[in-house]
Image: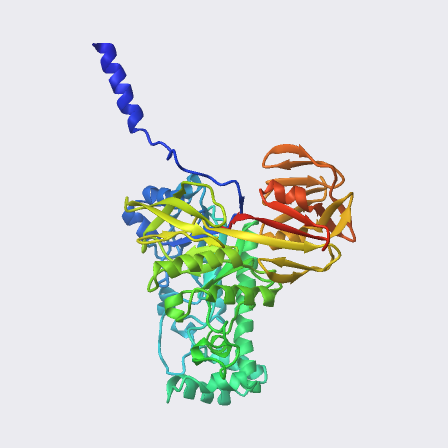
Amino acid sequence: MKKVFIVILILIIVLQLPVKNANSFTPNVLTLTKLKGLCIRADDLNKRGIEKSLKEISEYGYNTIFILVKTPEGQVIFPSKNFPVLTDTLPQIIEIAQKYNLKVYAYFPVMMDKNYGTKHPEDLMGNLGYEKNTYYISLLSKNYLNYIKLFISELLKFDIDGLVFDYIRYPNGSYDFSNSFVSLGKSNGIDMDYVKSVAYKTFIKPADWKTMFILYEKKDKDIVNWVNLRERVLKDVAIELKNYASQKRTNLKFGAFLVSRGYRYDSIETSPSIKKTYAYQKVNFSYFGDTFNGILDFVIPMIYLSSLEEKEDYVTVVTNKIKSLTKGNLETFVGVNPSGISLKDTELEIFNAYLYSSGVVLFRYPLFNMGDLILENPLEEGREVLYTVKNNLGNTRKEKTIFNDNFVPNAENEVIINHFYKFYTLVFKVEDLSYFVNGERYSMDVSPIIRDSRTFVPVRFLGEAVGFKVSYDPKKKEVLLDNGNIILKIGSNIYKSFGNELSMDTAPFIENSRTFVPLRFVMEAFNFKVDWDESTKSITIRGIIRVD
């Protein structure tokens, strides 16, 4: 009887253990590792439980948290003798985040601090309406910048991965007309009486919200110089704060959240609204997507569709514009806010962010439900995809769709940030500087060549075409693709594919300062189909990429 009881008890325990869905399917495709970030606030974590919240965030696919470490009121979330403390839980948050393999980026509003402004009204930003807003502090105040440095020195006692500047801008074009800023304008040869009169008409009385924008677009000398001066101050502040933090801690990443108006329309004449124009963005905030190029490591344009009154393709417009202006040297993550838009548009916005940027940052936990899914059959172009969606409300449902060009999960009550797939077709032609990605033409500065009866392509452009990262170790003479999933060695026919050592009948080489790799072996390692057309001397590559 005792043995029977033990057997029954074991069966009960085994049946209650969580098991993987027997029908789940993990496709063997190239996966692009993108940042999946989530803005959070310490008080929200405290209410829901820090351990519970961060565990949930990790389980639903996020790999990075952006935590507000100093509020607009000036309160910090760590123990401090110099600043008012909202909560002292940052050390605990970091410890638990690291437990769940979450990177921690700290962000704070640069020009907002009510605690400081209340005590130092002489350092407030000047507003032409003579408004005494105790939140907005002039970025020309050396005392305030020293105050921020003191805050940074305390913050960097904790093991964060990066520092992100929020509100490193002006509230609108009627700020900053403090005495120090007006004096700076005059010393730079700007007719400040004229600028003040234009700003007063634009923002105060009659507040037509057009005069300064039109003059800026028409390249009015004083207005343009004024806007550029304000932008220069923002750059100087970013440089000063970054340099200070870098001296305190090496290997930090630096970024900034950006308001993202004015990317679709370059001129007022072609835009349905001045609010959607480049001039509106530059005059009000005095920055654009390229302002911090060469200063910061990344920017996060806040592409909040409901407030911008835009569609999900605006992600493409903004990210492509930043890439063009910065020549791809400034990494871009897309800020997404699901509030006020449909879940379908949210999913499409996230999908576009993965295609055109380095990842997404959602605002904010726990203001929306999170989702995840399990694929139940292989992905094949033109065939039905079956999958199960779950969310953090405890709900699950079955979904199906036809996988043609891309796979974007169907959200009903949740936001899903993982399992986005796209079918890619790449075409390279021997001795041709052009190549095609899904029918769109791109160009290289060197062309593919044939050697040892194999087609070789410059690896940098192959990486750009597909979207995986390429790096080179000069000591080992190794080319690392997709974060080291594929490793090739110059002059060697031995290579590694996802940890397995394999051989090929040729070897990578360097010519004219370009690294060439054998196209077929590289793409077949990623499970792509490769076809050679002898008549056109072209090679076509087809396959599925998980873009998140």
- In the picture, residue 443 is in which quadrant? bottom right
The answer to whether residue 87 shows anywhere in this view is: no
Q: Is 149 located above or below residue 451 in the figure?
A: below
Residue 33: horizontal and vertical position, in percent?
Answer: 52, 47
Q: Is 454 located above or below residue 3 in the figure?
A: below
- In the picture, residue 387 is in which quadrant? top left
Image side of residue 278 versus residue 21, left or right: right
Residue 6: horizontal and vertical position, in percent?
Answer: 26, 15
Q: Nearer the viewer, residue 122 or 466?
A: 466
Q: Nearer the viewer, residue 445 or 83?
A: 445
Residue at 37% in and 59% down: 344
Residue 374: horizontal and vertical position, in percent?
Answer: 39, 42
Residue at 50% in and 76% down: 265
Q: Nearer the viewer, residue 227 or 482?
A: 482
The answer to whether residue 123 shows anywhere in this view is: yes
Image side of residue 136 versus residue 325, left or right: left
Image side of residue 58 versus residue 185, left or right: left
Residue at 28% in and 45% down: 395
Residue 368: horizontal and vertical position, in percent?
Answer: 32, 55
Q: Nearer the viewer, residue 502 or 356?
A: 502
- In the picture, residue 206 is in which quadrant? bottom left
Seen as rendered, the residue at the extreme front is 535
Q: How is the image coloured?
A: rainbow
